[in-house]
Image (cartoon, coloured by chain):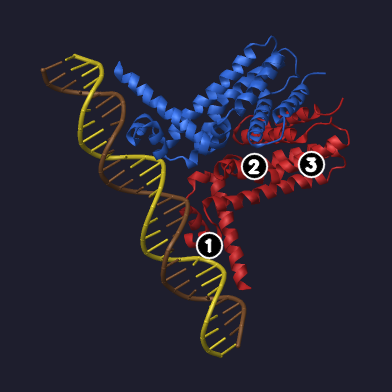
Chain colours: A red, B blue, C yellow, D brown
Amino acid sequence: MRRAEQREQTRQTLVRQSRLLFAARGYPAVGLAQIVAAAGVTKGALYHHFDSKADIFRAVLEQVQQEVAEQIVTAAEAQPDSWTRLTAGCRAFLTASTAPGVQQIMLIDGPAVLGWAEWRALDEAASARHLAEALADLVADGTIPAQPVAPLAHLLSGAMNEAALWLATTTTPNALDHTWAALARLLHGLRVH
Amino acid sequence: MRRAEQREQTRQTLVRQSRLLFAARGYPAVGLAQIVAAAGVTKGALYHHFDSKADIFRAVLEQVQQEVAEQIVTAAEAQPDSWTRLTAGCRAFLTASTAPGVQQIMLIDGPAVLGWAEWRALDEAASARHLAEALADLVADGTIPAQPVAPLAHLLSGAMNEAALWLATTTTPNALDHTWAALARLLHGLRVH
DNA sequence: GCTATTGACATACCAATGGTATGCCAATAG
DNA sequence: CTATTGGCATACCATTGGTATGTCAATAGC
């Protein structure tokens, strides 16, 4: 099985190096030449594993989304009730999205490279879905009023993503704390009084 | 003054046609050849008015943002107190951002083409700024608790932008109404009880 | 163990596209 | 009436994403 082993290693190297480059300079600014140089292979290898430049970006995006989703699920699972699962999940979402390179790959390049439809499909399948599930639980046990959860999930997801984007560039002191405080206020407003 | 007149007309034609193309197919998919063909000029004219493909996109983006900002300000100005100014402004924001082509240009291509820093600068100068001002008014007259308004402004701006993006692709019935209802709940939670 | 075949690449090349250098002609200045 | 500048068009270049072909080692079949 030397064959499959080598194959997987080459593929992972390409994804790893591409991710670093995309995160640092953005998709449009990274050429295939830089990717293959960083990975120590040639264009032949790249096009043996991926169909296009967008296709290798797709692989990177899926990896990033999976990592973010894992952090959210891990944080949420440790909580006892549905409300703290939501808040802990949101906190994890915010923290994970602030990690270096994540915004560039997920929010900036993602939609532009893949186009609306495909990006939506991937996005739905990832982090936004967990939010919707958490909200559905809250509706089910009456912690928040009955309402469609999809709009709310998108509002919250957008709020946190945009906040993460802002946090990455701002120099405001304690920006993360203030953002979390503001988000917590918004979330608290959802509860039945 | 035939000179300046002709100049302005050519420039506006280029911006108008580019806007239509970018909105329909997205920045990466639109070539300069299509732009100049649609505008009925040559590449010489395009590069006489703009420095690069990104530069003409910049002109389009500024036009779109200005239109959106105008709608928000118009809606807010008609309101009597600071709270209804916020809600009316948010509603206008949501409606304006849902208009055809706006999301593609403002949210999808914008950051990818211009890069974080420049897009941030333009974004701050446009719609997000009005939000921050409206929130500052609310803090000033005690309608909402004292807090830094910047994080809140970004959370709300992101929430509405993402919601607009979702509204553009979803087939859920009454999605706009439900989204507005959810947003109104979130906003209401900000008020002092 | 020997051969046939497939798979994992490398090499050479192509086409399209963003960008530039140059030239031309009418509008304005003096 | 002439000189000059501004507003473009034409021709061209260089880079880059993508492809067609070739090569050599790993595996399968006997």
Q: Secondary structure at mark 1?
A: helix
Q: Residues within 10 Å of mark 2 (few under 14, many from 20)?
A: some
Decide if residue B139 is on the left or right side of residue D13: right
**Which subunit holds the residue at mark 3?**
A
Q: Residues within 10 Å of mark 3 (few under 14, many from 20)?
A: some
Residue pointed to by mark 2: A120
Instruction: Single out the residue that lies furthest toward the top.
Output: B80
Residue pointed to by mark 1: A48
Instruction: Look at 84% across and 35% down and name the residue there.
Output: A139
**Which subunit holds the residue at mark 2?**
A
Q: Residues within 10 Å of mark 1 (few under 14, many from 20)?
A: few
Distance (Cα) linking label 1 and label 2: 27 Å
Q: Position of residue B78 (x, y in %)?
A: 64, 11
Q: Secondary structure at mark 2?
A: helix
Instruction: Look at 64% across and 15% down and name the residue there.
Output: B76
In front: label 1 or label 2: 2
- The kind of residue tagged 1 is His
Q: Quadrant of residue A96?
A: top right
Among the two numbered marks 3 and 2 on one chain, the one whose residue lies closer to the N terminus: 2
Say if B145 sits above or below A172 in the image: above
- The kind of residue tagged 3 is Glu
CB atoms at circles 3 and 2 under 8 Å apart?
A: no
Say if A105 sits above or below B80 in the image: below
Among the two numbered marks 1 and 2 on one chain, the one whose residue lies closer to the N terminus: 1
Q: Nearer the viewer, residue B136 or B53?
A: B53
Q: Position of residue D13 (x, y in %)?
A: 30, 48
Instruction: Look at 74% across and 19% down and name the residue there.
Output: B146
Residue pointed to by mark 3: A133
CB atoms at circles 3 and 1 under 8 Å apart?
A: no
Say if B139 sits above or below A113 in the image: above
